[in-house]
Image (tube, coloured by chain):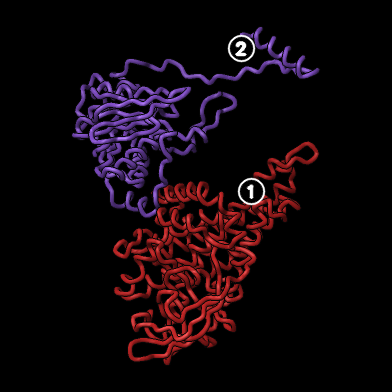
Chain colours: A red, B purple
Amino acid sequence: MNFEFTKEQLLIKKMVKAFADSKVAPLADGIDEQCNIPRELLAELKKLKIFGIPYDKKYGGAGGSYFEMVLMIEELSKVSAGLGFFMAVHYLGATAINLFGTEEQKKKFLPRLCSGEAIGSFGFTEADTGSDPKAVTCNAKLVDDGYILNGQKRFTTNGSEPGVLVTFAKTETGVSAFAFDKFQEGYSVSKPWEKMGNRGAETVDVYFNDVKLPSDSLLGQEGKGFGILLRGIAIGKLNMSAISLGLGEASLEEAIKYAKQRIVRGKPIATLPTTQALIANALVLNESSRWMLYRATEMASKGLGDIDYESAVTKLYIAKAIKDSIDYSLQVHGCYGYVRDFKVERMYRDIRLMEVIEGASEVQRVIVASNALK
Amino acid sequence: MHNIVCIKQVPDTREVRLDPKTGNLIREGVPSIINPEDKNAIEEALRLKDEFGGTVTVITMGPPQAEEALREALAMGADKAVLIGDRAFAGADTGATSYTLGCAINKLGKYDLILCGREAIDGNTAQVGPQLGEILGLPQITYVRKVVIRKNIIEAERALEDGYEVVSTQLPVLLTVVKECNEPRIAAVADIIEAYREKEVIAWSAKDVDGDKARIGLNGSWTRIRKAAAVKPQKGKVQILEGSVGDVTKTLVAEFNKRNLL
C-alpha cells in the first residue's frame, strides 16, 4: 500500500491551489450570488488545461488518470464548490464518451471537450423519474439517417453551456444513450433553477423538439443505455465526493481560523474543550472521507475492483460525513456561521446536494446492500 | 532566440519556523520551491520565447531533489532541463557555484540571454548572477523589471530604490530580474503530466561539466561560513506618551534625536 502522492500529483495540487487562490477566490462569492461561471474565468480555466485530464493524448487529453482529475476538483471546490460542480458535470458527459464512444465519436467530441471549447453535460433525470430507466419518457425514433429525439430532461447542469450532451431516451429495444452537440435545431433550455447551493453551474431543464440526430450519435449499443448511465455516474460519484472533501477541508480551515481569532472571556475559543471537540469531530470525518475517496479513485484509475460498488460506498459515506463535518465547523462559528459574511454558510448550503445527486443516498444504499447480499 | 535560465530550489521561507529554544531554523517538513525571483526569470524567458520563438533551457546546481524544480520549469514551458549534481560540488560558495554554472552553460552552446533571479530567499547574496556574467564575459543588466528586445539590441529597465534607469546593450547578455518584472504563469495540469512523464531532465556530474577541480565545491570556495546564529530581537521598555498631540510629538522627536534615529 502506498499512501504518498507522487511528485507529479503534489505539483498538480500545488498549481491548482495557486490558481484557485489567485483567480477563483476573488470571484467565489459572485459565482454563488449570480449562479454562473464568469467567461473570463472560463478562459483562464482553459489555460490551466484541466478539461481532459484522464483521457488519451490522441484525443487532446492529458494522458493522466482519474486520480489527478479528482485532486483538481477537490482543490477547486475548496474555494468554489460551484466551480467544482461545473467541472464534475463536464467530466460526467466527457467520461461517458471516453468509455463508450467509438473511435470516430471520441475523435469527434473529445478534442473539443478536452480543450474546454465544449462543456460536457449529462441528462438522465426527467420530471417523473430519477434513477428508474423504465420510467424514461424521452424517445428517439429510428429514421433512415439517424434518430428523431423528443422529450424533456430535468435538472441538466451545464445544459445551457455550449458543448456536448450525453442523454438517454427510449428506443425500440430499450433505453439508449446518445451524445450530440447542444443547441442544434430543436434543442432549447428552461431558465435556470434557483438552487440552494453549488450555484456556479447553471442547472436547467432541456427540451428536445424533433432534434435530428445522425446515427453516429448513438453511444454504445441501442437499448444498452442503462449500463452507460451506471458506469458514467460511478466515475461521477468520485468527483461529487471530491467536491465534498474539498468543502470539508475548507470549512474546517475556516473553523480553525475563527477559533483562534474569536476571543471569549479573554481567551480564544480554540482553548475551550467544547470547541476542540467540534474541530476533532470534523477532522476525523474529513480524514476518513479522504482515504475512502483516494482508495476508490486509485482503484478506478487502475481498473481494480467493482467501481460501481466502490463509488456507491464512497459517495454514500462521504456525502453524510462531510455534511456532518461542515455542521461541526459551522457550530464553531456560532451565529456567525449562519450569515453570508462567513464562508462556512455557503459551504453548508453546497454540501446538501451530495445526498440527493447522482442517485440519492437511499439509492446508494440499495447498490451497497445488493452487493453485500448477493 | 535561445535563452538559458539559472534557477535554485530553496526552502519556502514563508513556511520556515524558528526553534524557540535554539533559535535555529526548523527545516523538517518545509516545502521546497523554485526561488521566487528565479520563477520571474523563467517567466521572462518564456515570454520572450512566446514573442520571438526559440528555446528555453533551465539549469540548476543542487541535490537530486532539485529535479522537482526543473520539472516545474518544464511544466511552465521550458524545453530542456539540466541538473548539475555531484558530491564534488558540495560546500560551494557563490563563486564556486557561478564558476560551475558557467562551465555548464559553455557546454550548452550558443545562447542569446542568460537569465537569473536577483537573489535567492535562503542566502540573499545576489552574487551568483553578476559573478556568472563576469565568468562568461558577458555584459550584464541587474535588477531588471522590464525587457524590450529589437533585433540584436536589448533595452531594460533597472529597478532602483527611488526610480528606474534604462540600460541598453547588445545580445548576448546576462540579466538578473526582480519580482516586478512579471507574474509567473501557473503550470497547466496537462503540462505537469507531460513534464513528468515525457520530458527529460539531463543529469550532469562534475565530469560532464568538465571544469577546473580547484575551482569547484568547497575547495574552490573563497569564503567559509564560520558560524550561523539566530539574532534574538531585543525588547526595549514600552513607554506610553500622554498629553496633547503637540506635546506627544515634541517628546517623540526628542526621544528619536537622543537615540540618533532621525
Residue type at the position of mark 1: Glu
Which quadrant of the view contains residue A45?
bottom left
**Crowding near the residue tagged with mark 2, few <14, some 14–19, many ≥20 C-alpha atoms within 10 Å:** few
Which quadrant of the view contains residue B68?
top left
Which chain hosts label 2? Answer: B
Q: Residue at x 42, y 92 (%)?
A: A172
Identify the secondary structure beneath mark 1.
helix
Q: Is residue B197 left or right of residue A120?
A: left
Q: Nearer the viewer, residue B227 or B189?
A: B189
Residue type at the position of mark 2: Leu
Which chain hosts label 1? Answer: A
Identify residue for label 2: B261
Q: Is residue B72 left or right of residue A361?
A: left
Q: Position of residue A189 (x, y in %)?
A: 52, 76
Asked if A223 appears above or below B184 in the picture, the reply is below
Q: Position of residue A32 (x, y in %)?
A: 60, 59
Q: Position of residue B198 (x, y in %)?
A: 28, 52
* Residue A292 seen by the camera: no
Q: Residue furthest top?
A: B258
Q: Is residue B166 left or right of residue A13?
A: left
Q: Residue at x 44, y 23 (%)?
A: B160
Asked if A299 appears above or below B143 in the picture, the reply is below
